[in-house]
Amino acid sequence: MDVRKKLEILADAAKYDASCSSSGGKRKAGKEGLGSVEGMGICHSYTPDGRCVSLLKILLTNFCIYDCQYCINRISSDTARARFTPAEVVRLTLDFYKRNYIEGLFLSSGVIKSPDYTMEQLIEVARTLREVHGFQGYLHLKAVPGASKELIDKAGLYADRLSANIELPTDGDLKKLAPEKSFAVTGGTMKEISARVEQSRAERQESPKAPKFAPAGQSTQMIVGATPTPDAAILDTASRLYTRFKLKRVYYSGYSPIPLVDARLPAKSPPLVREHRLYQADWLLRFYGFRVDELTPPEQPDLSLELDPKLAWALRRREAFPVDVNRAPREALLRVPGMGVRTVDRLLRIRRWHRVTLADLARLRVPLTRMKPFIVTADHRPTGLIDSSRLAERVTPPSTQLSLFTSAREALTGEL
Ligand code: SF4
């Protein structure tokens, strides 16, 4: 099979993996090297099917000895198969890089023979790029769960980012649909990466010449909607992964139905907005001080599809409002619907000089209509609105066609 045909198959097979982002990479070529990674992320663009557009995103092979039921590449799947040699991946990466098509490589793989054998092949690509060709572009390698500590240690010395995919939100889900996998094995790989990242940071503080280990950290992917597991369990798993293994990101990827699947899998993808709500909730957990049980209480274990998770929380917890923007601590301001992290930090600066008014908020370009029932300013106090049965309706923005630029701004600021 020629390389072009292989590329067709293996680039398509890689689109199901959403755990790809280059944020945080910093690498510069010296006199001998080639390419560099900017401090700001070089790869924030995704096509609607999850493909990351400025990395060469491929699988080394879509042959796999495992039988994960939700995966098109499982051993029992009747899909076209292909396999690159490490040398072919190296050549493609260099050719695309020199033509300015890509800024780096995202390389994953089905499991060939064993986790260790697969990891060795992935490392061979990374080693050749870095050591033989002086390639200094971005490298994101899949860490195959269960690969030996020595191989993970080696991979992290070449890669900017490593990702071991947790795949499903609970161990029970894995047992049902991917019996060769387990939280314990994937967690062990994540733990090893996390320990080595910490160790490398400590060593580099002692000596800046100490080698970097996966300087852009680790991420993972969780498939959503392949099982009936509610959002509460998904967020709980994500939250534990962030805390235990210092993950940079958990990527949520809606299950895509594939041909001839197990009858236990749904025939339809979950609505796209569910993924969006999970990303919003994830943001609230990491940067706004929310807990999982506040966003998904036992009586409502799934996030609302209609309301963003912060607004839904505020409507359930009306006794926490209105919040006086001139007196409230940072933590309380962060819980006001429409008040993002950047806005709160600006407000805290403004109120050192004078009492904040609605005009100040308007200048910060906050969604005032949504925010007004929840706040007190120097010239505004909501009158009974917070108790109104029609509050949700009044503060929910009407449905509109999503604007590319609005989405891009929200993605940048994460304001909720
Ligand atoms: S190990 Fe990965 S590639 Fe193999 S079947 Fe499972 S999800 Fe698919």
Image: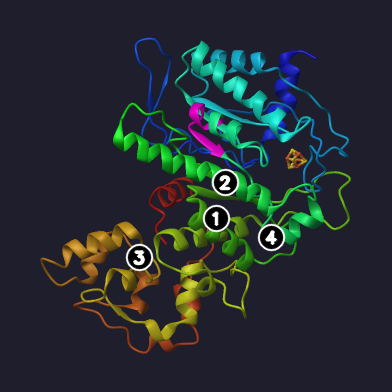
- Label 1 neighbourhood size at 10 Å, few (<14), some (14-19), many (20+)? many
Q: Amino acid at mark 3?
A: Met
- Percent position of residue 270, x then y: 70, 57
Q: Secondary structure at mark 2?
A: helix
Q: Secondary structure at mark 3?
A: loop
Residue shown at the point (73%, 54%) measured from the top left = 269
Disc 4 target residue: 170
Front tag of 2 and 4:
2
Span colored in magenta: 155-162
Disc on the earlier residue, 4 or 1: 4
Disc on the earlier residue, 4 or 3: 4
Disc 2 target residue: 190
In the rendered view, would you say 355 is above or below 266? below
Cα gap from disc 4 to disc 3, whole angstroms: 33 Å
Cα gap from disc 3 to disc 2, whole angstroms: 34 Å
Cα gap from disc 1 to disc 2, whole angstroms: 9 Å
Q: Is residue 274 left or right of residue 113?
A: left
Q: Amino acid at mark 4?
A: Thr
Q: Amino acid at mark 2?
A: Met
Q: Secondary structure at mark 1?
A: helix
Residue shown at the point (63%, 26%) measured from the top left = 122
Q: Is residue 299 left or right of residue 358?
A: right
Disc 1 target residue: 241
Cα gap from disc 1 to disc 3, whole angstroms: 27 Å
- Percent position of residue 377, x then y: 23, 76
